[in-house]
Structures are given as structure tokens and as C-alpha cells.
Image (tube, rainbow, N blue to C red):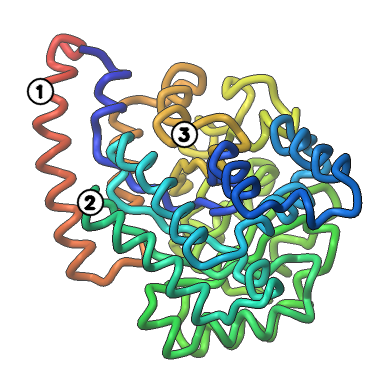
Amino acid sequence: MSVETFIQAMPKVDLHVQLEGAVSRDLLLMIAEQNDLASTYKKRKQYDDWVALLREPEPKQIDEILLEAAGWVRHPEDIARVVYDYGVQLAKQNVKYAEVAVNAAIYTDLGLTFQQVLEALNDGADRLQRGWKVRMNWLLSMPRERPRKSDDISRWATSVTAQKGNVVGLSLIGRESDQPIAQFRKAFVTAAKKDLARVTHVYSEPDSDSFATVMEQVQPTRVTDAWGLIEDDEAIEYLKEHDIPVLLAPMREIFLSRIDSLTDYPLRQLLDKGVTVILSSQMPEIYGATLTDVLIRAVQESGITVDEVQQMMLDAVRYSLLESEDKKAMLEDFEQQLAALREEHLSGEME
């Protein structure tokens, strides 16, 4: 037994997943073939070019690729299918709970109602929970390139239908250069009034909105993709003072060719400065790494300890958007499992 086998076996939570980047390529292509999506393009070559990009995505085109490929999932039963399929992959990693962001506007643009989309998501999640004991909740994503749609999405997220349908947050996705954060202020204010969690990225790109502006406009519950955070001591102190966790998907930076390995990622420095860091997979199908892979590589390449990995997963439960009683029960279960797994996998390592 080893550190790697312990991480593989440990119960986990993933708080930062974008559904469109988590769906299996093979399943997407199967759905596209079954629905004869190639015939909807003017020329077959256009479809084939998108397939090639999906198989080997170009980082600069990733938003467009995901938007196009997700649009192949056009029927409620197919939405349920991709949710279930992704959930099975979580179960195989012993991920017990995931908070999954969904760009629902993709599917409403294709003619489905928001209620149909939400019912399809929960159909897949319900079957997953019954069969594999994995639970999912949803965040609705506002695409940065579509600010005019943000108010609609915020209204969906704060509706009674959404609250009954396991929607727990509102998130912002896309390139920060597309639109300034102020374009989404009204949507986030609506969410805050209904006590709905708000999630946004910071420092994802050069010349993006300032940290102070993002905090003022969004009042986030958590932040993601904080690539430049390590260089801003004031921002770090703000996050610590306001108890805002940072959900990091370091494989994103490798995909974008910002770093060659996690050795170059400032994870150790962020932890040493007292930032609450929780690792995540974000888009495992695109980045080629599951949450388990990320955690193992963080130990091997970033110098974090097994204790810190364990603490991250407990923090993931604590900072999740589960109800208090569910959170308490999951924490107790995780602590019991982790104690037993440490004895089984690490007793020799610790001697």
C-alpha cells in the first residue's frame, strides 16, 4: 500500500466541475451519431473539423469547442445520459459528492425549457444516486460572452423550480476579456438577495478585472482559477478574512501551457500563506486528469502532504453547498473512512 493507493481509495468531493468539459468524448460522439448531427451541417467537413477539435482541443478555442459539442446533446434523455455517465466515473474514484456547473442556455437555445433541462439533469443524477450512491448538485453558469442572458439565468437559478431542483449556486464562465464583471452585477445581486451562492474566477487572464472590483461586484461565496493570486498579498488577506475558499484546477494551467508540471504551480506557497485551497478537476475530459489524478500529482510534484490532501477533502465538505445536516453526516462518514484507510494504506509509510 502507498500514498497513491490511499488517495485512490479515500472518499472525495469535487466542488468545481463544468459539465460541458466533463462529458466523455466517446459518449458525445455516440450521441451525435445516433442523432445524425452531421446532417445538420452544410458540409460534412464542418462536422468532421469539430470532431477533430474535440479529440485534440486547441486551448485558444476551448470555449467554442465546448459550446459546439455540448449543442449535440439536444434531447432530455441525452442530457440525463451524460450526467449519469459522468457520475459513474466519479463513483469509480470514490467521489461521493460533486457540485457541477451547467451552461443551461446551450439547451434552452435548442428549444428546451429551463424546467425540461433541470428535470433531465436530475433524472440522470437520481439514477446515479440510486445505483452508485453519488450525489450531485447544480450551479447555473452565465457565459461571459452573453451578458444579456445573465439576468435570465439568474432568475432561473433563484426560482422555486431551481431551489426544488438542487440548484445551489450561480457561476460565471468564459474568458474574462469578453466582458467586464460589471455586466453581471445585477445577476449576482439577484442571487445574493436570495442567499444563493456566487462563484467566479479571478486572475484568469492578464488585464482582467481587478480583484477588488470582482469582490465588490460579485460578493463571491468562493473563487476559482486564481492564477495570479500568489502575487497579491492584499487579495490573500481579504480571502482569509472573509473565509472565501479558492477552488483550484491546476491541470488547467498545464493545458494552457502556462506551466509544464505542477512543480511550477504555486500551490505550496498558497497553502503556506494560509489560503483555504481545495483542488478540483474542473474539466477532466479536456484536461485529461480526474480529481484523483490531480491529488496524486499534487503530492508528487507540488510537495503537499497526505495530511494536506486529506484536509482539502474535509474542507471540500465543509465549504460545500449541502444543507447543514447533510454536511455534518458526510463529515462524520469521511472522518471514519479516512481513519480506517490511513491504517490500511499508510501505516507502513508513517513508520
Secondary element at image label 2: helix
Q: How far separated are the C-alphas under marks 3 and 1?
A: 25 Å
Look at label 3 and name its amino acid.
Answer: Thr
Q: Which residue is mark 1?
A: 343
Q: From the viewer's perspective, is 139 left or right of 47?
A: left
Q: How far separated are the C-alphas under marks 2 and 1?
A: 29 Å
Look at label 2 and name its amino acid.
Answer: Gly
Look at label 1 and name its amino acid.
Answer: Glu
Q: Which residue is mark 2?
A: 131
Q: Position of residue 189 (x, y in %)?
A: 61, 85
In the rendered image, the quadrant that contains the N terminus is top left
Q: Which residue is drawn at the image coordinates 52% and 83% (left, top)?
A: 192
Q: Position of residue 215 (x, y in %)?
A: 64, 69
Q: From the viewer's perspective, is 207 left or right of 335?
A: right
In front: 46, or 219? Answer: 46
In front: 209, or 179? Answer: 179
Sooner in the amino-acid sequence: mark 2 or mark 1: 2
Q: How far separated are the C-alphas under marks 3 and 2?
A: 21 Å
Q: Which residue is mark 3?
A: 290
Q: Is residue 145 above or below residue 254?
A: below
Q: Nearer the viewer, mark 2 or mark 1?
A: 2
Q: Nearer the viewer, mark 3 or mark 2?
A: 2
Q: Position of residue 318 (x, y in %)?
A: 30, 57
Q: Residues within 10 Å of mark 2 (few under 14, many from 20)?
A: few
